[in-house]
Structure formats: structure tokens, C-alpha cells
Image (tube, rainbow, N blue to C red):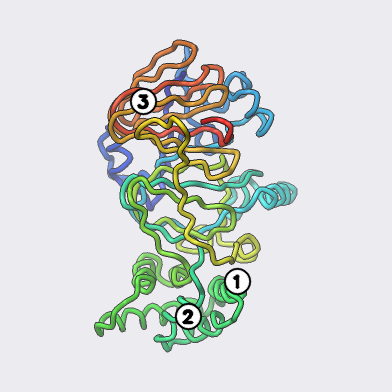
Amino acid sequence: MHRLTNQVRPYAWGSRAAIPRMLGREPDGRPQAELWLGAHHGAPSTLCTEDGPVPFDDYICAGPKDALGEWTVQRFGERLPFLLKVLAAEEPLSLQVHPDAARARAGFAAEEAAGIPIGAPHRNYRDPHHKPELVFALEPFEALCGFRDPADAHADLRELDCELARALCCDLAHAAPHIALRAALTRLLTLPAAHRGRLVGGFVAECEERAAEGIPEGLHTSTVIELARRYPGDPGAVAALLLNRVTLQPGEALFLPAGNVHAYLHGVAVEVMASSDNVLRAGLTGKHVDPVELLDVVDFSVLPIPYTHPVHTDGQELGRSDFRPGVPEFALVALGPGAIGADLPGDVPVVVLALEGRAVLRAGTGQQMSLGRGESVFVPAEAGGVRIDGHGRIVAATVGDDDWA
């Protein structure tokens, strides 16, 4: 087992206190949005080894089967297939969607062939992998996630008389929900630049006028106003009317497959995902937006909110929740809060993070390590699994093989 040193991503939407508090550090006044635990080339963790600090990706390259195990290497090649994050959102993230595996491979290959640098601001695909993800709330966590019934959005818009509202009402009146939603989102993402500010501004102004007059706001209308104040003139704020507004309570989780339009609004959560950084943005951002590519990737189905519930098995340890959403790249194990006593699998890679409290990890090889709040460790496949005992709250990410319990 090896202790990890992990990188913090200082995105502007991040909380200034949540991640430093977890790590036992003094806030420095700058936003700290995401703590990355993994081997992704964008911000790889560093392992503490007998030979000194080693970047996670270099460690894997030096002994992939020892680090990852035979099954993982056969399935994913010589790379860690998952990435664990702590996400701390003080302000809303961009409205976004992730591609499926085929689209990611094709898009990455096309941009490589075109000679677009990996770090170019207009690049869509930074690696050839898909990015399904699971978000697990550590506190009340606000998000927009997936499409609501267009009839509900139509009902919200009927009370408005501005030009954009009338046009969207026409779009959403189509009898086929997926056609109605595609038409409405396409309209918003392709508003002519010369008129975008006027159309979006007029829409938001009418919503605010009604609120000022004491006319009750619906949840989605208030969300539009909230987002428009942060991103004036951005049609992504109006797109919130098309989406489900979700509040996760601590311990609840969402699984976001390819094509699901979403935006995290506020709160602290753990994310685990296939190791990728492919994000197609629809709005609420100053970054590159490619409407044509995004609209081809979006799934316009009206589906239930994708809550994912823990899988319970015979002999499940008390206080343990296993989230396995059916993708091979990852699974998440949540332990606690409270007393902890659990066995995690052998022959596969595991990344363990202590969110609070203290625990002792005992590997199958006999190695023992203590883990306190904010500390993390990589358990390689060759360690033969790990037993965790203690008190507090622990999360662990591993591959999503459903054969282990």
C-alpha cells in the first residue's frame, strides 16, 4: 500500500474552505474546486514509495499487472480505469454532457488527425475514453440532471409573453417529447449572437418582474433567475427549465451515463468516474461551446431522475454501502459514518480516502497502515485485498467487476 499526495484543481466555481478543511489545511482565499485521486494525466496523484515519490501513472507503467491485476489489464490496458474526486461547488458548474465510448474514440481520433493540440481551448476530446460518473453527496447537494417532461416546461412558459418564451412554447408543444426537447435546446444553443443578449435578457427580465409583483415562482423559474444573475446573457440559464432540479441528501447518489445533460449547482460530494476529461459544454461557462457536437451527443429521452441505490449482498458489513451502477470501470464503496469494519477486494486496484475519523488498513500481504482525515492510499492488486477497521467515514473506489462482493 502507498500513501497518496493528490492535486487540487483551482476552478473558479470552487469552495474556498471545504477541501482545505477536509485536508486539515488553512484556506488560502483561493477557490479549491476538485481534489483528484488517480492516475489521469491531467493531474496524477503521487505515490510515496521506498524509492521516494513516484507519479501514479509512472508507478503503473513500471509494473502494470502488480498494480492493476490481470483482469484490469486485460479489460482496460495498462491504465487505471477510474478517477476518484472530491468536488466542492460554491457556484454552479457548466451545463454539460459526456460522450459514449464510440463517440469519444472517434472524436479524439478526428481531432488528433486535424492536429488540434490537446490543450487547445476549442478542443472537445482530450482522451479517447467515455466518462460515465457517479456523484455521492456528503452534504445537501444541488444539481440539474436529465430532461423533465416537456409538457411541464411548456406549462411554466405559458405564463410568459416575451419573444423567446413564445418560441420555446412552440418547440415544446410537439407531441413527441424527444423532438420537442431537441427543438427547444437547439434553439437555445443556436441563438444568433447579435440577438442572444436581448432574447435571454428579455426572458430573464420577465421572470424577475413576475417575482417582484409577488407572482409565485416555480422551482425552475427561480433556478433560471439564479443562474442568469451569475451568467448574464447565457442561454444555458434558460435551459434549466428543460431539466430536473435535484437535491441529494447526504449518502444519496446519482449515476450520470453518456448523453445526460447536467450541471452541479452547489454542495460537496464525492465523484467516481471512468478516467477521462471529455466534457462537452452547453452553457454557464466562458469555455468553448460546440453546439453541433453537443446536440449529436445528447440523449433527449425523458427518463426518471437517475438515482442509484447501494447494492446489498449476503453478509454485508454494517455501515457499508456499495454503489455499482453497471459500468466496468468503477464502483464506489462508502463506509460509515460511525464504526467501520469491512473487507475490500483483492486482485484489483483500490483507492481509499478518509473523509473523517481514523481507520487502520491491513493488506492481505500483512502490511498495515493508519489513515486519518483527508489522507488517502493506493492498494495495488498485488496487496491481496485490504481490511479496514476504525471509526469515521471512508470512501473507496475500485473497478466495477460485479463478481466481487
Query: Is residue 292 toward the left or the right of residue 313 in the image?
Result: right
- Which residue in the protein does label 1 denote? 178
Q: Earlier in the sequence, mark 1 or mark 3?
A: 1
Dot 1 lies on which element? helix
In-front residue for pair 31/377 = 377
Residue 25 coordinates in the image, percent (x, y): 27, 33
Relative to 153, residue 312 above or below: above
Q: Residue at x 29, y 79 (%)?
A: 216
Dot 2 lies on which element? helix
Q: Which amino acid is tagged 1?
A: His
Residue 298 coordinates in the image, percent (x, y): 60, 62
User: Is residue 315 among the parts visible in the rendering?
Assistant: yes
Relative to 47, residue 187 above or below: below
Q: Which mark is residue 341?
A: 3
**Which one is closest to the eye, mark 1 or mark 3?**
3
Q: Residue at x 40, y 27 (%)?
A: 376
Query: Is residue 54 toward the left or the right of residue 388 in the image?
Result: right
Q: Earlier in the sequence, mark 1 or mark 2?
A: 2
Q: Name the residue at the front extreme.
A: 314
Residue 210 coordinates in the image, percent (x, y): 31, 83
Relative to 2, residue 40 above or below: below
- Which residue in the protein does label 2 denote? 154
In-front residue for pair 122/388 = 388
Dot 3 lies on which element? strand
In-front residue for pair 350/80 = 350
User: Is residue 31 among the parts visible in the rendering?
Assistant: no
Relative to 275, residue 374 above or below: above
